[in-house]
Amino acid sequence: MTHFKTLTGLALAATLAGGVAEARELRLAPAAPPAHPANGVMYQNFQEYLPEESDGRLTGTILGPEVVNLGQMKDALQSQIAEVGNLLPLYFPADFPNMALTGELSLLGTNSQATAAAVTEYTVNCEPCQKEMRDNGLVFLGSGASDLYEFMTTTPVRTAEEFEGLRLRSGGAPWGRLAEHFGAVPAQMSVFDQFEAVSQGVIDGTMASVADLISFRMVEVIEYVTYAPIGMYQSTSNFATSAQTWDSLSAEDRAAMVRAANRANTDFTHRWAAEMPAEAEEAAREAGIEFIEADPSLIEAINDFVATEPDTAARLAAENFGIEDGDARIAEFLALVDKWTVIAEEVDNDPVAMAERIQAEVWDTLDYETYGTGM
């Protein structure tokens, strides 16, 4: 009884002194089902880290993809249906041309943690990227990356000639260019639509993460997986935050959000790039899917095409969006990829170690009174 009275007295004292502030609950939109690492790891870990990093001042509730999907994300954040969301700039290239520039180089990716860190550092320090985020009412809190993409098809593909005429789902312009180069027909569609499109014979396969075999049930409709060097999905704004929400937070809480996001970003990349491929391959082999090593001539042809992508990205940036210094920006980004590749290899791609390095070299250098505010 004495203990109860003591607690009651403390609670009353706190109330008389102004009370204890309730935690701010943020609406979080991963735009993916729980089986996908964007939801099951990235956003669920972020939800866990928010109160840890903010001493309980910030929490979050997750909205499912049936509430906000990838194509709706920009509008949902601007209208504050969601306050933090998984935004993919390649879905909105006209609104985010400077951010999408790194996405145009997606075929060059080889190390997922290094690429994600490079995109993060590049975007934080890219003034035009920051401006277009703010102009769209958003704030950038870091990136992640997928595992290496593969060809997943309903007919076997080993050589360049076997691509001719195939209808392949493309998750962005770089893979569309690759498909067309080899005589295939790219189909631009959401990752959510690829299962139905393959099952109904609308397309013959997809260029995507092998993890999609289990994230989006592609294991049920795909018959062949061809290993080939076709990059990774790297143009992401994993925790794009409504500027209205950001502006309402103290500098202390903004920094806490960043720490939580940074930890979740490297967790997400580790889950997608290091853990899920093995799980997906095991499920695929159990389902009778055949794994194919591409013919050396196809590998060489792909590498030759990929080598032209920096020049192509710079030309398209100038032609489509008036970005005249695309060459310099691309060189800057690729230098960051080299820098972070060395770091990632030093720490053996460990997600905790990568988060610590990114926090120290990128996020801890910022002033949270002004970052993301347009000041």
Image (cartoon, grey):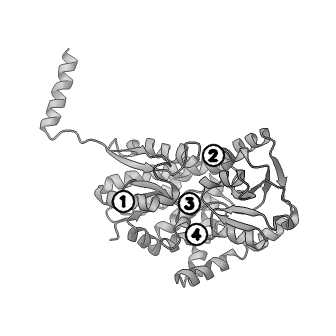
Q: Is residue 108 visible?
A: no
Give the side of residue 142 with respect to residue 327, left or right: left
The mark nearer the N terminus, 1 or 4, is: 1
The Cα atoms of the two marked residues, 1 and 3, are separated by 29 Å
Residue where numbered disc 1 is placed: 79
User: What residue sits right under mark 3 in the picture?
Assistant: 117
The residue to which callout 2 is attached is: 215
Depth order, front residue of 166/90: 166
Task: Please indicate whether residue 13 sits to the left or right of residue 239 in the image.
Answer: left
Closer to the observer: label 1 or label 4?
1
Q: Amino acid at mark 1?
A: Ser
Classify mark 2: helix, strand or loop. helix
Q: Is residue 32 left or right of residue 230?
A: left
Dot placed on the residue nearer the N-terminal end, 1 or 2: 1
Q: Verify CB contact (< 8 Å) between mark 1 and mark 3.
A: no
Label 1 vs label 2, nearer the camera: 1
Image location (x, y in percent) of residue 45 = 49, 43
| 212 vs 369: above or below | above
What amino acid type should be assigned to the residue bearing mark 3?
Ala
Label 1 and label 2: CA atoms lie apart by 29 Å
Marks 2/3 in contact by CB < 8 Å: the verdict is: no
Per the model, the C-alpha gap separating discs 2 and 4 is: 25 Å
Quarter of the image with the N terminus in it: top left
Q: Name the element at disc 4.
A: helix
Residue at 68% in and 75% down? 309
Q: Nearer the viewer, mark 2 or mark 4?
A: 2
> Looking at numbered disc 2 in the image, what kind of residue is underneath it?
Ser
Circle 1 SS class: loop
Task: Report the residue that reaches farthest toward the left.
Answer: 16
Which mark lies nearer to you, 1 or 3?
1
Which residue is label 4 attached to?
102
Q: Is disc 3 placed on a helix, strand or loop?
A: helix
